[in-house]
Image: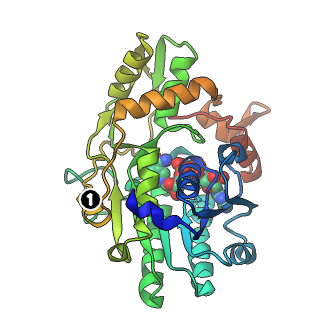
Amino acid sequence: MRKLLECKNNTFFVTGGAGFIGSEVTKQISNSGGNVIVYDNFSSGKKTYLKNIPNVKIINGDLKNKSLLSKSMKNCQYVINLAAYPFIPDSYHYPQEFFDVNTNGSLNVILEAKNQKKIKNFVHISTSEVYGTSKINPMNEDHPTLPHSTYAVSKLAADRAIFTIHKEHDFPAVIIRPFNSYGPKITQPYIIPEIILQFLQGNKILKLGNIESSRDFTFVSDTARGIITSLFVDKAIGETINLGSGKTYKIKDIVNIASSILNTKVSIKMDKKRIRPFDVNLLICDNKKAQKLLSWKPEVSFREGLEQTIMWAKENPINFKNAFDGFVSKSNGKKKKRTVKQYESNKAQTNFRRN
Ligand SMILES: NC(=O)c1ccc[n+]([C@@H]2O[C@H](COP(=O)([O-])OP(=O)(O)OC[C@H]3O[C@@H](n4cnc5c(N)ncnc54)[C@H](O)[C@@H]3O)[C@@H](O)[C@H]2O)c1
């Protein structure tokens, strides 16, 4: 917590700052006395998620727009690069767009930041998905990177580009690898929002994909705190650092915990359509490096975080459409791929669905 006080009187450029993790990062910086420039194209992020947060300037911009990036980050001391297409199943349908945004977009952000000559530190947000399914438990930063999805490959390529630019140009940068995050201000049909949605719709039979797969979940406030803290630790520069709880839950365990929070009994039906090709079976974080370098440990228990998320979802109803149909529209009985524009405007309405 002490480290967050260093936000005071500094200006942070946060790409994807209107998103799920980004809006929490923005809130914590603002609460700690910092100023934030949120740079977001609102493909999934929402202006309402930034309502009532003081000292925030919002720029509607895209990672592909280099001149706007450069203009917008003038007078900033720190950069947090969160903007991305983060939803794995989308990457099966839009592989090139995932590289355009997640890889080339990130490259644009770091190159423009480097050209500013005044940036004190840069944190790039990677993902545990770059490791693929666990081969060594728990997974530390030296775990082999064997990504299972185009999303994960696009993120890994960005990590390596950020790392080499840091080395080649002596530009300060940290790579943070969050494991799964969850919490309020939902933007994507990740597994926890999907489960909560089906409960809140009153379904007695939940339709889910691979309920045996296990993930390591961190509440979003803990993830955001780790990301911000990394900017103020000199020893973190040039490092890749995992953020995760070190505990895993199978998807069916999450259903059981949600069931006890909501006091509602349900059964689970496997929905073949939701099984991911080449799925990751297990992610479990070794967070010793984050503990050592950032003095970071998760503070919110899984149950407590799930209660907060459910409470938020009750007050802010989510409405996801069927996922895989969400990326393909039916026309004259034939399936037709949506354009990226249609896809993004669909997402902007938080009107999609998939676990
Ligand atoms: N949520 C998780 O469990 C998790 C885990 C590991 C890593 N991550 C990473 O964290 C970051 C944030 O993910 P999130 O879960 O908050 O997703 P999100 O969709 O809520 O956030 C992404 C944000 O980026 C914006 N954006 C997308 N494309 C853009 C573009 N071309 N230009 C400008 N803005 C653009 C979106 O509007 C959104 O606000 C991503 O980089 C993701 O890969 C997320």
Residue displayed at 49% across by 76% down: 121
Observer-nearest residue: 314 or 335?
A: 314
| Residue 213 spot, x, y in % from top left | 33, 36
Can residue 31 be seen here? The reply is yes
| Residue 336 spot, x, y in % from top left | 72, 42
When the figure is inspected, residue 38 is found, relative to residue 193, above or below; the finding is below
Count of numbered badges drawn on the protein: 1
| Residue 285 spot, x, y in % from top left | 28, 51
Q: Is residue 152 left or right of residue 60?
A: left
Q: Is residue 128 left or right of residue 351?
A: left
Assign a secondary structure to mark 1.
helix
Residue displayed at 62% across by 75% down: 76
How dense is the environment of label 1, judged by Cα within 10 Å: few (below 14), some, or many (20 and up)?
Answer: some
| Picture quadrant of residue 115 | bottom right
Q: Is mark 1 within 8 Å of ligand 1?
A: no
* Residue highlighted by disc 1: 291
When the figure is inspected, residue 161 is found, relative to residue 148, above or below; the finding is below
Quadrant holding the N terminus = bottom left
| Residue 138 spot, x, y in % from top left | 21, 51
When the figure is inspected, residue 90 is found, relative to residue 267, above or below; the finding is below
Q: Is residue 321 left or right of residue 124?
A: right
Observer-nearest residue: 198 or 276?
A: 198
Can residue 273 be seen here? The reply is no
Report the amino acid beneath label 1. Answer: Gln
Residue displayed at 44% across by 27% down: 307
Q: Which of the colour schemes (rainbow, by chain, secondary structure, one colour) is used?
A: rainbow
| Picture quadrant of residue 345 | top right
